[in-house]
Image (cartoon, rainbow, N blue to C red):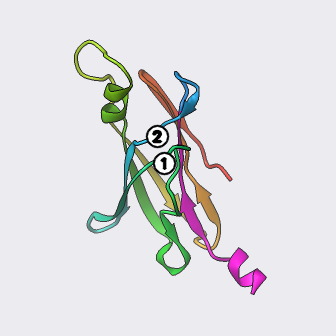
Amino acid sequence: MRNMVSRMGRLTTHVLDTALGKPAAGLVIELYRLGDREEKLTEIRTNGDGRADKPLLEGAALTAGTYELRFHAGDYLRRMGPAPGPAFLDVVPIRFGIAMPEEHYHVPLLLSPYGYSTYRGS
């Protein structure tokens, strides 16, 4: 049974507010599967640790293909403090491919009011 569990893929994410040096709690994230048409799979709000409470996708639900995470950074940044006018960043889309759905794909967002970065984590 242990080998079976280790081969079940999953997709996870988290958001760190690099300007404040802490997890980005309460940030809305949408997940879409892209193909002939766009399909919204889920929407979550990050917990106090800047993470989803469970994987966004796992097991048979995680298939090879192209996906997009949409991080609603503007709403989060406006809550964190007053800024003149609209936030520089609003919705941050990260489009990525899943080639081996039996693996763990972790897509974190490192966010500040004026920039962001991502990578494939573990």
Q: Secondary structure at mark 1?
A: loop
Report, in whole angstroms, how far the alpha carbon at label 2 lies from the one at label 1: 5 Å
Local packing at callout 2 (Cα closer than 10 Å; few below 14, some 14-19, many 20+) is some
Residue 113 is situated, as x and y percent measured from the top left of the image, at: 42, 22
Q: Is residue 32 above or below residue 36?
A: above
The amino acid type of the residue labelled 1 equals Asn
Q: Position of residue 38 (x, y in %)?
A: 28, 63
Taking the view exactly as shown, the residue that stands out farthest to the bottom is 1
Is residue 104 found left or right of 62 in the rendered image? right
At x 63%, y 76%, the residue is 8
Q: Amino acid at mark 2?
A: Ala
- Residue at left 52%, top 21%? 19
- Residue 82 highlighted magenta (yes or no): no
Query: What secondary structure is marked by label 2?
Result: loop
Task: State which quadrant residue 41 falls in.
Answer: bottom left
Q: Quadrant of residue 79?
A: top left
Q: Nearer the viewer, residue 37 or 117?
A: 117
Residue lying farthest to the top in this orientation: 84
Nearest to N terminus: mark 2 or mark 1: 2
Whether residue 90 appears in this view of the structure is: no
Left or right: 93, with 118 as reference point: left
Splitting the image into 4 quarters, where does residue 86 fall?
A: top left
Which residue corresponds to mark 1?
Answer: 47
Give the x, y percent position of residue 98. 53, 64
Relative vertical location of residue 99 with respect to residue 30 in this rendering, above or below: below
Instruction: Provide the residue designation for mark 2.
Output: 25
Whether pointer 2 and pointer 1 mark residues with C-beta atoms closer than 8 Å, the reply is: yes
Tell me: residue 50, above or below residue 33: above
Residue 42 in the image, given as x and y percentages of width and height: 36, 63
Residue situated in front as seen by the camera: 20 or 90: 20
Q: Which residues are magenta?
A: 1-16
Hey, which residue is sitting farthest left in the picture? 85
